[in-house]
Image (cartoon, helix red, strand yellow):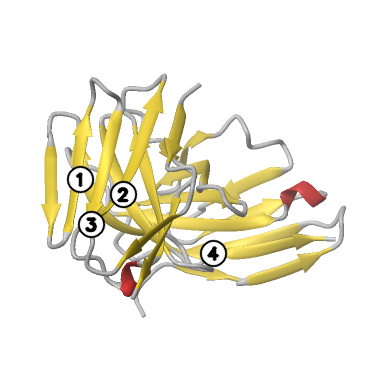
Amino acid sequence: SQKIEQNSEALNIQEGKTATLTCNYTNYSPAYLQWYRQDPGRGPVFLLLIRENEKEKRKERLKVTFDTTLKQSLFHITASQPADSATYLCALVGTGNQFYFGTGTSLTVIP
Amino acid sequence: DTGVSQDPRHKITKRGQNVTFRCDPISEHNRLYWYRQTLGQGPEFLTYFQNEAQLEKSRLLSDRFSAERPKGSFSTLEIQRTEQGDSAMYLCASSPRLAGDTDTQYFGPGTRLTVL
């Protein structure tokens, strides 16, 4: 079965630095990959989508890369702010439209 | 608020009881998903509908779980004979699936179930 791994440890970074989160997967060939943000007690919120034939996507301070050879996606937040503190989830989506979420990475941006 | 809504937000029940949750998607969205999320884990897919048709169910969805979307609008998720292992956050999401487009999900706030 497919396996999705995100940074196993919580990530703490200083305000203004770039946060880099990883999403590695095995036993799967997703059609596309998405990143979501989740705050405590709330549902996830969509951030970015990247297709299998795309290498990189950007949106404001966010950047996502997708390497289907390495089976890895990297999610970057540049000029991080305390308001970016949350759990970030990657989700793989196959042709059958079933979504597989990773366990998430907790990010804390320290002022 | 025109987002996805779920009711109730919290449910406490005793083991063996039946519970039903409701999800109201964004009105023009034709796809609706149910997920379960436990502490420290990502959402786990349960099932999804396109309009009123249930297109896929997870193998993890036991016979005690059933979902409906009778008119292609709101959906209900029922759990019969609840067990303590059913305690989790149940999330609903909807998406405006268009032909040839990718699927982006809009999540509701979830229903937190506690089985005593």
Share a chain, discs 4 and 1? no
Q: Secondary structure at mark 3?
A: loop
In front of the other: label 2 or label 3? 3
Sequence-wise first label, 2 or 3: 3
On screen, residue A109 above or below A93: below
A83, above or below B101, in the image:
below
Camera sees residue B82 = no
Using the image, tell me which numbered label, if any, was put on residue A35. Answer: 2
On the same chain, marks 4 and 2? The answer is no
How far apart marks 3 and 1 lie (CA) works out to 13 Å
Extreme residue in the bottom direction: B1
The circle on residue A64 is: 1
Q: Amino acid at mark 2?
A: Trp
Q: Please name the residue that numbered disc 3 is placed on.
A: A18
Estimate the spatial distance between the alpha carbons at disc 4 and disc 2, rounded to whole Å: 19 Å
| First of labels 1, 2 by sequence position | 2
Q: Nearer the viewer, mark 1 or mark 2?
A: 1
**Which part of the image, by quadrant, shows the C terminus of chain B?**
bottom right
Identity of the residue drawn at 58% across and 56% down: B90
Q: Earlier in the sequence, mark 3 or mark 1?
A: 3
Residue A56 found in image quarter: top left
Give the spatial CA distance, label 2 vs label 3: 17 Å
Query: From the viewer's perspective, is the residue at label 4 or at label 2 nearer?
Result: 2
Marks 3 and 4 in Cβ contact (< 8 Å): no
Q: Residue at x 27, y 71 (%)?
A: A81
Q: Marks 1 and 2: CB-CB under 8 Å?
A: yes
- Under mark 1, the amino acid is Val
Residue, disc 4: B110
Q: Viewer-proximal residue, B102 or A17? A: A17
* Foreground of the two, A24 or B100: A24
Contact flag, marks 2 and 3 (Cβ < 8 Å): no
Q: Nearer the viewer, residue A55 or A93?
A: A55
